[in-house]
Image: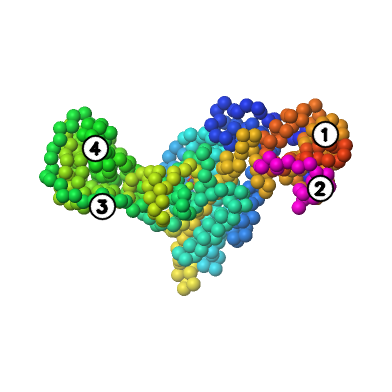
């Protein structure tokens, strides 16, 4: 079968202008180059070129999953409520879940991820330790009613995910299945030509390396991560734990009250007193499982609620409300200090024993100076809870960290026995007793990877795919009339016969300029032009990425491309 795709037959309508609602480069280019079209908010139709790229990514993912011994299955996207009710996620997902009813009024959902259903399948299929370990995967459509489905296919409400799940009888087995996935993901993203980092997704609080994210640095990314310019350290901002530089202890005088009217914020206070914000102690009030708690950090730092939540999980952390203040007159909004307060006090390690601070005096319009940790107040728990900032020291090498944007393209997770407990997933062990199974879950955003690749590889002219992922290996352009068209088609057939996937632009009545512009926009990595010197059998071979061009005979061009 011929692999030559004629542009005149291809359903593609390129656009010169960016779609009005597009904010990210990948969104603009994938629409302009005719890869995808928006059907509704966060819901995309994949047109022929886009489908090819999507399939190429799926193929790479499939090959590497098969290579680690994972077995492909296909589970439904339309799911009954009960298993998700059992795991608690019918509620937990909140507005993110698409819920629907059948004609009898029974509740269903469109699967956002499939831990529950895979657990049930394995419970049904595997009964003995001899049936394990097993790793299953699918490449399937997922549904999440995302709050802001912007950025094109980067964040869809319907999207393609490869999700896999591992089932082991021992903790060591889970660690091994996790390691296999981690290595497979490294291969997959390398083959896709993505620049990526692996970061720990959570801080130590929930079990260290039990969850890692694969991030593709890109300006359009919605995740912020820290990247060390000097060593290979990279981390999710919420997972950075750095050794705080503790201010030197001083020998201060007694606590002194200061009249500081209208200074409820650190900025107003620091300006009023003419001191740096770092000399002040900021106390954020939160509720931990309903119990009001103060969190102290130096005035120039912010509290990272995500980090705090992770340290304290499974306790629920919320901000206090106006009503909470009404019930507690001793808590003076804007003027809270830890001295004399009878609530739990969590602090950043910088609030070390012996350090002295300017902080609230627990009276309206009043602050206190020389408030000394250990003398005037006690810290109940020291936790690393500040928002990491550009320039903070790298925990590995001490160099100032950079903050960068990235796209989460994959996530691997040691789940443990959570779902196995819910569904009583046991197998008969070697000793004849039931053994509870331990699980891992692993995701790759297949449709998101299309956008991530576009973000990382595109330039002003358009898309620019790595060869393995591109919709064709070579884009042949007939830049002229009958002679050029004849040569273009002839070269195309020869390339195809040599096993290459060829896209040939032989559209009659379309100017060479338009054809060149479209070729750059579509982003096939090699462009072969039959132009001025067609009569001599000389063509031009252009590299889409570098822009390098060479005049070659047809034979030379073919051997260059098939090398
Ligand atoms: P995000 O934080 O970006 O919302 P997530 O952490 O909720 O993602 P996971 O549940 O870990 O996502 O899903 C596995 C993978 O699926 C993600 O790493 C990402 O690549 C992809 N993914 C998640 N949500 C979407 C979406 N709305 N559109 C496209 N891909 C998505
Ligand atoms: Mg994730």
Classify mark 3: helix, strand or loop: strand
Write the residue at 84% across / 36% down.
533
Classify mark 2: helix, strand or loop: helix
For label 2, the crowd category at 10 Å Cα-Cα, with few meaning under 14, some 14 to 19 and many 20 or more, is some
Numbered tag placed on residue 275 in the rendering: 4
* Magenta-tinted stretch: 543-563
The mark nearer the N terminus, 1 or 2, is 1
Numbered tag placed on residue 556 in the rendering: 2
- Residue 280 at x, y = what percent? 24, 40
For label 3, the crowd category at 10 Å Cα-Cα, with few meaning under 14, some 14 to 19 and many 20 or more, is few
- Residues tagged 2 and 4 counted as in contact (Cβ below 8 A): no
- Residues tagged 2 and 3 counted as in contact (Cβ below 8 A): no
| Outermost residue, left side | 254
Question: Which residue is labeled 3 in the image?
Answer: 381
Q: Nearer the viewer, residue 17 or 170?
A: 17
Q: CA distance from mark 1 to mark 4?
A: 73 Å
Question: Which residue is labeled 1 in the image?
Answer: 532
The mark nearer the N terminus, 1 or 4, is 4
């Amino acid at each position: 079968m011929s692999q030559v795709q004629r542009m005149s037959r291809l359903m593609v309508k390129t656009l010169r202008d960016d779609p009005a609602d597009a904010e990210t480069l990948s969104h603009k280019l994938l629409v302009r180059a005719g890869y995808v079209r928006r059907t509704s908010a966060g819901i995309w139709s994949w047109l022929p070129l886009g489908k090819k790229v999507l399939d190429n990514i799926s193929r790479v993912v499939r090959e590497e999953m098969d290579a680690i011994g994972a077995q492909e299955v296909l589970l439904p996207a339309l799911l009954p409520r009960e298993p998700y009710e059992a795991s608690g996620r019918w509620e937990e997902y909140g507005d993110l879940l698409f819920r629907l009813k059948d004609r009898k009024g029974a509740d269903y959902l469109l699967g956002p991820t499939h831990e529950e259903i895979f657990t049930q399948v394995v419970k049904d299929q595997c009964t003995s330790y001899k049936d394990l370990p097993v790793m299953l995967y699918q490449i399937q459509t997922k549904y999440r009613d995302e709050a802001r489905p912007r950025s094109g296919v980067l964040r869809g409400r319907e999207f393609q995910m490869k999700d896999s799940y591992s089932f082991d009888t021992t903790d060591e087995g889970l660690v091994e299945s996790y390691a296999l996935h981690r290595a497979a993901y490294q291969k997959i993203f390398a083959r896709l030509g993505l620049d990526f980092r692996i970061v720990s997704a959570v801080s130590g609080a929930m079990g260290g390396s039990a969850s890692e994210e694969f991030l593709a640095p890109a300006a359009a990314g919605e995740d912020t991560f820290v990247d060390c310019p000097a060593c290979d350290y990279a981390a999710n901002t919420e997972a950075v734990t750095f050794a705080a530089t503790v201010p030197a202890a001083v020998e201060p005088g007694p606590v002194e009250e200061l009249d500081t009217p209208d200074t409820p914020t650190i900025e107003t206070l620091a300006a009023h007193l003419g001191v740096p914000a770092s000399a002040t102690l900021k106390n954020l009030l939160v509720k931990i499982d309903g119990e009001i708690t103060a969190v102290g950090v130096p005035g120039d730092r912010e509290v990272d609620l995500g980090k705090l939540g992770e340290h304290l999980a499974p306790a629920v952390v919320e901000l206090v409300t106006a009503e909470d203040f009404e019930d507690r007159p001793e808590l003076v909004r804007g003027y809270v200090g830890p001295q004399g307060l009878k609530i739990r006090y969590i602090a950043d390690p910088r609030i070390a024993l012996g350090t002295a601070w300017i902080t609230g005096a627990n009276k309206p319009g009043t602050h206190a100076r020389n408030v000394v940790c250990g003398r005037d107040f006690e810290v109940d728990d020291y936790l690393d809870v500040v928002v990491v900032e550009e320039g903070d020291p790298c925990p590995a090498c001490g160099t100032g960290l950079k903050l960068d944007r990235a796209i989460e393209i994959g996530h691997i997770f040691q789940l443990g026995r959570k779902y196995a407990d819910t569904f009583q997933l046991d197998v008969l062990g070697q000793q004849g007793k039931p053994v509870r199974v331990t699980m891992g879950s692993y995701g790759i955003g297949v449709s998101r990877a299309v956008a991530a690749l576009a973000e990382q590889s595109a330039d002003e002219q358009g898309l620019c795919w790595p060869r393995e992922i591109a919709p064709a290996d070579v884009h042949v352009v007939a830049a002229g009339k009958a002679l050029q068209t004849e040569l273009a088609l002839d070269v195309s057939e020869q390339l195809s016969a040599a096993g290459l996937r060829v896209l040939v632009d032989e559209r009659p009545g379309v100017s060479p300029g338009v054809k060149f512009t479209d070729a750059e926009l579509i982003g096939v990595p090699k462009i072969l032009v039959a132009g001025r010197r067609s009569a001599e059998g000389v063509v031009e071979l252009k590299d889409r990425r570098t822009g390098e061009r060479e005049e070659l005979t047809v034979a030379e061009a073919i051997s260059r491309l098939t090398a």
